[in-house]
Image: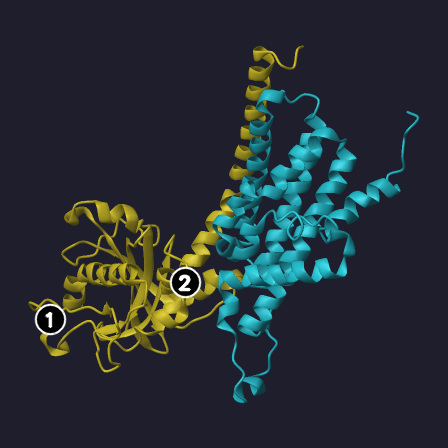
Chain colours: A yellow, B cyan
Amino acid sequence: MDRNSNAYTFIFAIVLVVVVAAVLAFAATNLKPLQENNVRNEKMHNILTTLNLMSDMSEMETTFNKYIKQQISLKADGTIDESVNAFTLNLKKEIKKPIEEQRFPLYIAEKDGKKFYIVPLFGAGLWDSIWGYIALEEDKNTIIGAVFDHKAETPGLGAEINQKWFGDMFIGKQILKDASLGFTAEGNFVSVTVVKGGTPDENLHGVDGISGGTITCDAVSKMVQERISNYLPYFQNN
Amino acid sequence: MSNKEGLFSKKNLQLLKDPLDDNNPISIQVLGICSALAITVKLEPAIVMSVSVLFVLVASNVIVSLLRNMIPNRIRIIVQLVIVAALVILVDQVLKAYSYEVSKQLSVFVGLIITNCIIMGRLEAFALANGPWKAFLDGIGNSIGYAVILIIVAFIRELLGSGKLYGVQIVPQSFYDMGYQNNGLMLLAPMALIVVGVLIWAQRSRNRKLIEK
């Protein structure tokens, strides 16, 4: 057959594409369980990191189950929805729903006899999504650990939010202006803001921003504020 | 066949050796620079990247060489791209399954192997005109030539930039106590360019053949 005829070109292209598609589909299907397991492990790893717990990837599941005592899904009014599995909740999808249909996953951990509350975060960064986990102490006010990650923030600038030093700045900060007033009092929930140009260490509600990464930092502030605000009714009642 | 030559004849070995020095894809042909800058901050991703490129280049070279008498001339570039892209996606999927941390570090650069000029260059210039065994050797030679530069650059950058090698602390704490500091500039992309430049300089002054008149 003439190698330069249109018919040959078409047939060659079709056969090639079908073969390639078959190979890729086969590989993707076979590797999927392993990849999903990796994503699961990473999620557990991130949650445990907020409590400063390290674990081997191979023992992640055991460590996670040892410390995380409860995984609950909350409704907007702070009551628990038993029908939803907190771990598999996809925040990206939840955020788009109307507020009364959203479910908020909360992880309750116990370490050295103390209770900790871990709130998953999700929001929009400068280029793509950012997410993270923030762990609160038993008073549900003081932050004990935070990790952040991102999909596509600017390397060297906004992308630095996934570094340990950035998350560590949140340790010891508080989300309430006055803890004695409770969680739902008007204006009492001030969250923790990333401040452009820096802020003194004594500021309990702010951390230093990253030079050149202001938009990402603002997105972090907004994400922390928005996500935690959904948990206030639950925190008030429990 | 009268002109049958041995598997490792002098000519064939030349295919392996040439890209290591006289015709190195990075330092002489200046191809594949983009990835050389991006993933050489640490040794580990540089090595994984080298292995990935080795796999993609060798496999695509052999496949294209096997198909070279069947590929319609008018769509040969697209055919090459499809083959390379398929292999790259395979590498990406395998990394995600078996080496998740590294695949996160390499992120987009695995996908960008598709646009690595070395690969398309070798397919166009070599695999389309030569048999599979020669294409195989050519692929090995060129990807090792690429890997050598990548690993040297990553070695220098990780050692001077973070005081580590392959993630292991090399510079002892006592050095830091005496006032030694890691060179932060080494971690930034421009230093990769400068290191590559210095390598080219060293190579050219050593190898007289390369000096242009």
In the image as oriented, which residue stretches furthest toward the right?
A: B2
For residue A142, which quarter of the picture?
bottom left
Q: Nearer the viewer, mark 2 or mark 1?
A: 2
**Residue at the spot 22% in from the left edge and 60% down from the top edge:** A222
The quarter of the image holding the N terminus of chain B is top right
**Which residue is more in the foreground, B194 or A45?**
B194
B150 vs A109: above or below: above
What chain is tagged by disc 2? A
**Residue at the spot 59% in from the left edge and 52% down from the top edge:** B49
Tag 1: residue type? Asn
Is residue B21 in view? no
Left or right: where A79 falls relative to A138: left
Neighbour class for label 2 at 10 Å: few (<14), some, many (≥20)? few
What chain is tagged by disc 1? A
**Which residue is more in the foreground, B34 or B176?**
B34
Where does residue B90 sit, x and y in percent of width and height?
57, 40
**Which residue is more in the foreground, A141 or A16?**
A16
**Residue designated by label 2:** A156
**Residue designated by label 1:** A188
Whether the residues at callouts 2 and 1 have beta carbons within 8 Å, the answer is: no
**Residue at the spot 24% in from the left edge and 80% down from the top edge:** A200
In the image as oriented, which residue stretches furthest toward the bottom?
A: B178
Where does residue A154 sit, x and y in percent of width and height?
38, 57
Where does residue A111 sit, x and y in percent of width and height?
36, 74
Tag 2: residue type? Gly
Q: Earlier in the sequence, mark 2 or mark 1?
A: 2
A28 vs A102: above or below: above
Task: Assign a secondary structure to mark 2.
Answer: loop
Left or right: where A236 falls relative to A224: left
For residue B121, which quarter of the picture?
top right
**Residue A8, numbered circle:** none
